[in-house]
Amino acid sequence: MSEQKNPGGSGENGRDGQEEAVPAQREDTGEVIGTRRGMFGADNGGDTSGYGGLVRTVRLPGESSRPYGGPAGTEGHGEFDEIADELEGALDEQGLVPGNVIEKTVVDRAELTFHIERGALPAVARILRDDPALRFELCTGVSGVHFPGDKGRELHAVYHLRSITHNRLIRLEVGVPDADPHVPSLVDVYPTNDWHERETYDFFGIVFDGHPALTRIMMPDDWQGFPQRKDYPLGGIPVEYKGARIPAPDQRRSYS
Amino acid sequence: MTTAPHSHSSDGPRTASDFDTEPSPARETTEGTVYNVSGGDWDEIAAAAVKSDDERIIVNMGPQHPSTHGVLRLILEIDGETVTEARCGIGYLHTGIEKNLEFRTWTQGTTFVTRMDYLTPFFNETAYCLAVEKLLGITADIPDRASVIRVMLMELNRMSSHLVAIATGGMELGATTIMIYGFRDRELILDIYELITGLRMNHAYIRPGGLAQDLPPGAVDQVREFVKKMRKNIGEYDKLATGNPVFKGRMEGIGYLDLAGCMATGATGPIVRSAGLPHDLRKTQPYCGYEDYDFEVPTADTCDSYGRFLIRLEEMRQSLRIVEQCLDRLAPGPVMVADKKIAWPAQLALGPDGLGNSLDHIKKIMGTSMEALIHHFKLVTEGFRVPPGQTYAAVESPKGELGVHAVSDGGTRPYRVHFRDPSFTNLQAMAAMCEGGQVADVIVAVASIDPVMGGVDR
Amino acid sequence: MGLEEKLPSGFLLTTVEQAAGWVRKSSVFPATFGLACCAIEMMTTGAGRYDLARFGMEVFRGSPRQADLMIVAGRVSQKMAPVLRQVYDQMPDPKWVISMGVCASSGGMFNNYAIVQGVDHIVPVDIYLPGCPPRPEMLMDAILKLHQKIQNTKLGVNQEQAAREAEEAALKALPLIEMKGLLR
């Protein structure tokens, strides 16, 4: 039903009209990671809620351009530009082309994110750790995020690096396709990532090549599937209480 | 039965001299040829085991063992009394909280995160709320009073967490007196929590945008009373443990991890400070207005369990200082952001049934304003929308850097929340601390890390 | 269990029941089965202010073979479930189980893939104790109720009859989904 009401590109037009009503949509730029239709999670069959025509494109903040500014919302040339300059210079020294290694740079909410080409991740991490002007000594682990709608890079591995010397924090992000979920391991550079990578493998199925013992860490060894992916059900059971049956949280109606 | 035990098969291309042991003997039975197969390897191993005089034993401690914090499983390979290899088995308390969060609104998330590391509920809540506020872009709008109360509760929480660390650590050494002392003083703090939040543990009191409700009457007086009492009580730990030769003898030089080891394993909190680095996020990346408070970051240069014990004790003293400053700083004002699209409309006064809203409030919204009722309903059931993007917020929990990586897709529910729990990361240092030491020292080393399995496994 | 099973019914047995119950309830040894938040409250119950020693129960046994009460304090994960059952099997009879907190009793708020939805899927439970976590007073109340239950435990033929009656009552009981009103 919703398809008939809302053919083709009218989604974009409809979106413009909802600019006021949907505060989440800040701008049209950015990386599209999915589309949401309707409401209450009614996507199987007729939507009688009256929201069937609602189509929203989900966009994450997109690529930023120079100058990047700094962590305290600095305008113009700031700390983030220094980090980017140093990193690009160091990559040049190593014979890597910064434009190929750094897919894009995002500055959002006063935080700097480098999207790294996965093959170059260990080299980048080593530079970030060892270069005297960068010195990100502490890695706070890896966090997986699953974007089923982000075709070709469904699985993201997100690293946060902290420099105690310079008191800075940056984020590295690597996107890999679901069909080939391989990311080089950073255990050689940051041994602390040992358990973090095992955890991300356990929950998201991202395979960290070069990890010394990539096994499940949280779930039992014989567990099937990767529980924190979006396509893995929550696994709740309905609750029966006083003559009513309440479905598990992932089976309930929800605002999307 | 009649075949000779060492009859060799005659036509094999390889001879017996190719093997260290005899090849398989065969015999004819009515069912056909039967071979007695014995692999050469096993015989070698058995022979080596007989010859060797070392006692290489693998000991499983846990997951249900009284002196491992919670359900931690330690796999130790020991040679006599020496630990040659140590590994951790975790995941016995994995609760799937991060997944559960994705099916609730952003506000309901605090109810879940408070149960992660159950000894530091306010730190979990604050870290989560700071992340959500950063995503919403309202960090600067949080009322001062809310920030001051957050800091006060966090510092009280730091004390209660350190008290449990010292108490259970002492109990694991066999010093049950310290355990009784620790839990006695913790009760005083839990009484304050109960007065302020209504619960002893698992509060969900700190909410995105501020606090669930203001301090109840009498709370400030009780906290002042507590500070006075606690100043006296902390001295008792000094008298009992600091400098106590038995206590020192058990802890000095045990669980050694120097600064390079800390950086490599990502250990933070008292562990990195016991290696001499005064790294504390309250000083380096202040949040909730910590830059305005006067306190010191204690360090030690011993890199061992005893140093960590002294640091915890000193941090409790510093926390008392901060709590006093909070009390002086408390000025009347709102405890929730002014934005009515985020703040819950009710002040959540307690109803006659002990739950929910006050009757006055319900009468007002039901009787006077239909729109207010709709707004209330939408905000509570649907929740507010958070602009898409991701952020990382970190606080200095009693155990180290507690980081929250929150991702929003613009919906009313978190898309992904990942907790970088300090217990999880610090526990990796266990192997480095224990290998080469004695079995009895493993317990001391683990106690000095102070892992809480709720935080490790989430 | 032992000799008491062979005793005849009647006056003698009821007296023996009372005596055995009294002896058993007065020295219950809990096994430490602290899992999560509830374990902290369980430790608090044993410590100074609440002082479980008043009921002869302050000695938590590290070894299940020396314990006869298992207080399952906290959420039981799928990975922990086999361990829990093994610890229970290692306890000597007679043994009792308190399911402390909502997570152990029903899964509580963690209705998901990782948590066993109620420890009664794995071991028989004598007392369900709600709360998240229950206060120490609530745990003590549960323990006192369990003491009553232990005191009134039947032996021998009386026990068989009690078990038969309990089963008949359970067969007649409405399933939870069909119950209406206050569940009392």
Image: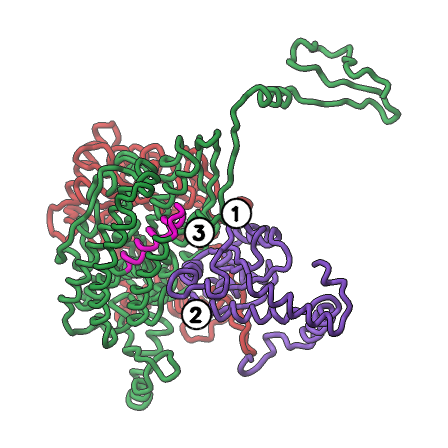
Crowding around mark 2 (Cα neighbors within 10 Å: few <14, some 14 to 19, many 20+) is few
Question: Mark 2, mark 3: which one is toward the viewer?
Answer: 2
Q: Is residue B166 magenta?
A: yes
Q: Residue furthest right?
A: B30
Numbered-mark total? 3
- Report the span colored magenta: B157-176
**Which label sits in the foreground, 3 or 1?**
3
Tell me the quarter of the image containing the N terminus of chain B: top right
Residue displayed at 14% across by 45% down: A79
Question: In which chain is the residue bearing label 1?
Answer: A
Q: Position of residue B350 (x, y in %)?
A: 33, 80
Q: Nearer the viewer, residue C81 or A38?
A: C81
Q: Is residue C22 in the magenta section?
A: no
Q: Are marks 2 and 1 on the same chain?
A: no
Left or right: where B429 falls relative to B278:
right
Q: Position of residue A229 (x, y in %)?
A: 45, 52
Q: Which mark is residue A220?
A: 1
- Front-lying residue, B209 or B49: B49
**Chain B, chosen colour in render:** green
What kind of residue is marked 3?
Gly
Q: Which chain is purple?
A: C
User: Please, what is the three-letter code of the amino acid marked with disc 2?
Assistant: Glu
**Secondary element at tag 2:** helix
Q: Which residue is mark 2?
A: C137
